């Protein structure tokens, strides 16, 4: 396997423009002769399917929800970044590029990140034209707020519902194409495998979640925009359905998986409250614009927060990182919260919580202003905790939130399987080892609206793509593999639900491959995962049949993939003997507890090649070359 990024040479700012000119085009009359499968209808997949349909390609789009509008992107709260510099506060494409590269701890590809920063400005125009109701200033201009890891205000938002509003924009564009007949939508349909013929991605095998019908769909190219795998940890801020199945199945068919250990732990989530919880709730990072994070200075101080005077509070982010304060990046803020709780100064019943306090901003701005900015988030918090955050500080704790790892892609967003393109959170993305807040929506929409429409045309125009017969032996083999796996899951009839295996796996990953990792813990996880997997295949219980709506079966398939994927995640974390971004190896830290990178040995993307059942994956390295930024120690002090 060879990893050729295909990033163009030449000055950074001109790469994408020149590349667009040099890529081949499909003429308008020929586009309808090409068919493209898009798996996923979130911001990345929905925008891609709509745009490709508008261009005239024959598109089939798939999602497992009952409507494309319910993709997990809908949950995004805080905002979307763009280097518009409406605030005149010093922002620029170069600054967004630099903040993103630095925020990712210098583990992302320069050319991709620069392109992302360039395209960011077009995204806002596109979404405004679609009618996305971004917040506006009094004079009518679009408003901005700040997010972590930046000293400028570049985040566009629609209250605490930015993802939902952006998704409605993409969904309208998609529906228009559905009604025009260029996009055929397949909701409630789960991709269970990838069809590769003569080394090229040529289709998918799906299961209809209501009827159980297995079907094969063939096309000239396949796009995966299936989101992230944070749910490997069981408890996360992701929607319950988020999974690794599509990308893991593609990995097993030859797509390299990059940086699987790069997971983002978000600092502001509602703390875990009990053993039976199946989901965690994010409190948007935007709240850190006006909320101050603190814990009591004294260990074991159980007084109510209002009774702890200012002099006895430790506003530890402001103390440790004076120039970024409460808006330091997520990985840094998460570790600082863990440190405070490990030190015995955590709050709430479990001691695994810190305060996010709005007292000062309410005094300064008034309750109404805070309500305008964050009203729905405050209401959500109150409904879940039964505490009024206008009166008492929120309690927050870090939780798994986003995955920077994903399928390896080149500059054209193509994986190591020709014809298989990967967009949005599903690819290993432009965020290196840590994503800055409000940059995932930007990346998903950049990929879908502005990158793939060019690069897929180039792929389709670059070589003849002969038709594949439905009875081609490769197609038949994949169909058979899906059928036998489904019946195997149903036939075990053991004593444990898929959920109970998932919960056990999640705890193990959180303990050994979560916010802090070390070699001993990772080795222990690597020893335990195969035996858990073995037990799964002996003792799983999936009631019902495959020919009906069967959520137990859906879950079982996803958990089976998490159980394989988890091993790769730990292996990747073990091999990366450095700390960078969200990957914190306790053996590699500075005396004051900050991440210590090893640029000499680890300035590369780790891309793993599947070697077969029970065999360790093979590591390939894409060296990262920095021609435009200096690899400095990341500091937010
Ligand atoms: C609570 C929360 C808040 C967030 N807030 C922000 C924010 O404010 N700003 C920001 O930039 N980012 C935010 N993020 C991150 C951001 O929302 C996601 O990274 C982004 O929306 C992912 O978009 P996507 O299109 O790649 O995937 P998704 O939106 O997850 O869509 C995945 C699609 O793939 C489909 N799919 C998956 N697997 C299969 C399969 N096997 N077969 C068929 N279909 C499949 C699903 O049905 C779905 O349509 C937030 C994340 C969370 C969890």
Image (cartoon, rainbow, N blue to C red):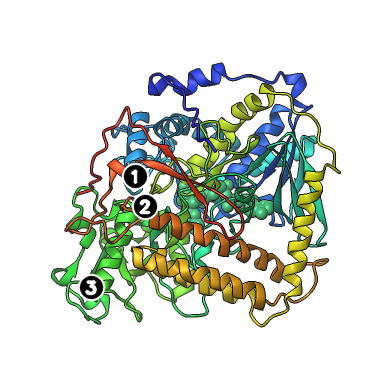
Q: Quadrant of residue 612?
A: bottom right
Q: CA distance from mark 3 to mark 2?
A: 27 Å
Measured as percent of width and height from the top left, residue 429 is found at 48, 42
Q: Sequence order check: which comes first, mark 1 or mark 3?
A: 3
Residue 28 versus residue 104 in the image, above or below? above
Query: In percent of the image, x 58 and y 60: which residue is there?
Result: 614
Q: Which residue is label 2 attached to?
A: 576
How crowded pointer 1 is (Cα within 10 Å; few <14, some 14-19, many 20+) is rated as some
For the residues bearing labels 3 and 2, Cβ distance under 8 angstroms: no
Q: Which residue is mark 3?
A: 343
Q: CA distance from mark 1 to mark 3?
A: 31 Å
Q: Position of residue 374 (x, y in %)?
A: 42, 57
Q: Earlier in the sequence, mark 3 or mark 2?
A: 3
- On screen, residue 261 above or below 502: above
Image position of 107 (left or right of 157):
left
Q: Inspect this view and state whether residue 181 appears.
A: yes
Q: Which is more foreground, mark 1 or mark 3? A: 1
In contact (CB < 8 Å): disc 2 and disc 1: yes
Give whichever of discs 2 and 1 has the lower sequence position. 2
Q: Which residue is mark 1?
A: 602
- Distance from disc 2 to disc 1, alpha carbons, whole Å, reads 7 Å
The quarter of the rendered structure image containing the N terminus is top right
Q: Is 87 left or right of 21, judged from the image as shown?
A: left
Dot 1 falls on a residue whose secondary structure is: helix
Q: Residues within 10 Å of mark 2 (few under 14, many from 20)?
A: many
Closer to the observer: label 3 or label 2?
Answer: 2
Q: Is residue 190 left or right of residue 241?
A: right
Q: Is residue 160 visible?
A: no
Q: SS of the residue at dot 3? A: loop
């Amino acid at each position: 396997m060879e990893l050729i990024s295909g990033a163009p040479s030449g000055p950074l700012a001109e790469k994408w423009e020149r590349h667009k000119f040099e890529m081949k085009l499909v003429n308008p009359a020929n586009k309808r002769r090409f068919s493209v499968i898009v798996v996923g209808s979130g911001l990345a997949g929905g925008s891609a399917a709509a745009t490709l349909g508008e261009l005239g390609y024959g598109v089939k789009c798939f999602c497992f929800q009952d409507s494309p509008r319910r993709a997990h992107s809908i949950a995004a709260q805080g905002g979307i970044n763009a280097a518009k510099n409406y605030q005149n506060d010093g922002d620029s494409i170069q600054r967004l590029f630099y903040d993103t590269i630095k925020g990712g701890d210098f583990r992302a590809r320069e050319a991709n990140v620069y392109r992302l920063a360039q395209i960011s400005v077009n995204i806002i125009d596109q979404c405004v034209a679609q009618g996305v109701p971004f917040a506006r200033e009094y004079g009518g201009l679009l408003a901005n707020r700040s997010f972590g890891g930046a000293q400028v205000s570049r985040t566009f938002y629609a209250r605490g519902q930015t993802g939902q509003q952006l998704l409605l924009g993409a969904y309208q564009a998609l529906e228009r194409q559905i009604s025009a007949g260029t996009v055929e939508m397949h909701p409630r349909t789960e991709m269970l495998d990838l069809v590769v013929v003569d080394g090229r991605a040529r289709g998918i095998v799906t299961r209809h979640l209501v009827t159980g019908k297995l079907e094969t769909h063939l096309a000239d190219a396949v796009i995966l925009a299936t989101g992230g795998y944070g749910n490997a940890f069981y408890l996360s801020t992701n929607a319950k359905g988020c999974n690794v199945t599509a990308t893991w199945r593609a990995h097993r068919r030859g797509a390299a998986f990059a940086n699987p250990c790069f997971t983002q732990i978000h600092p502001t989530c509602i703390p875990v409250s009990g053993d039976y919880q199946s989901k965690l709730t994010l409190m948007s990072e935007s709240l850190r614009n006006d909320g101050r994070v603190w814990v009591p200075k004294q260990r074991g101080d159980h007084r109510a927060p209002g009774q702890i005077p200012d002099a006895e509070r430790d506003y530890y982010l402001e103390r440790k990182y004076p120039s970024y304060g409460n808006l330091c990046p997520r990985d840094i803020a998460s570790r600082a919260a863990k440190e405070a709780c490990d030190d015995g100064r955590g709050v709430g019943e479990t001691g695994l919580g810190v305060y996010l306090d709005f007292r000062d901003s309410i005094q300064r701005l008034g309750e109404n202003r805070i309500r305008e900015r964050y009203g729905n988030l405050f209401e959500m918090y109150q409904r879940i905790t039964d505490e009024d955050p206008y009166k008492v500080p929120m309690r927050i704790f870090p939780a798994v939130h986003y995955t920077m790892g994903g399928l390896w892609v080149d500059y054209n967003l193509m994986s190591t399987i020709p014809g298989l393109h990967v967009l949005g959170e599903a690819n290993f993305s432009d965020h290196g080892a840590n994503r800055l807040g409000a940059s995932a929506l930007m990346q998903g929409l950049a990929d879908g609206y502005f990158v793939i429409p060019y690069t897929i045309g180039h792929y389709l125009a670059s070589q003849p793509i002969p038709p594949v017969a439905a009875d081609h032996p490769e197609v038949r083999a994949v169909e058979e593999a899906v059928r036998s796996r489904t019946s195997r899951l149903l036939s075990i009839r053991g004593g444990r639900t898929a959920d109970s295996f998932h919960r056990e796996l999640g705890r193990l990953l959180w303990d050994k491959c979560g916010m802090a990792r070390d070699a001993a813990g990772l080795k222990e996880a690597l020893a335990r995962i195969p035996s858990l997997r073995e037990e799964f295949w002996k003792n799983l219980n999936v009631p019902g049949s495959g020919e009906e709506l069967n959520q137990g079966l859906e879950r079982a398939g996803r958990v089976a993939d998490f159980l394989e994927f988890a091993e790769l995640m730990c292996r990747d974390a073990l091999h990366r003997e450095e700390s960078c971004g969200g990957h914190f190896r306790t053996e590699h830290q500075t005396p004051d507890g900050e991440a210590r990178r090893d640029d000499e040995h680890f300035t590369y993307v780790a891309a793993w090649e599947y070697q077969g059942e029970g065999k360790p994956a093979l590591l390939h390295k894409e060296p990262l070359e920095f021609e435009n930024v200096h690899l400095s120690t990341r500091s937010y002090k």
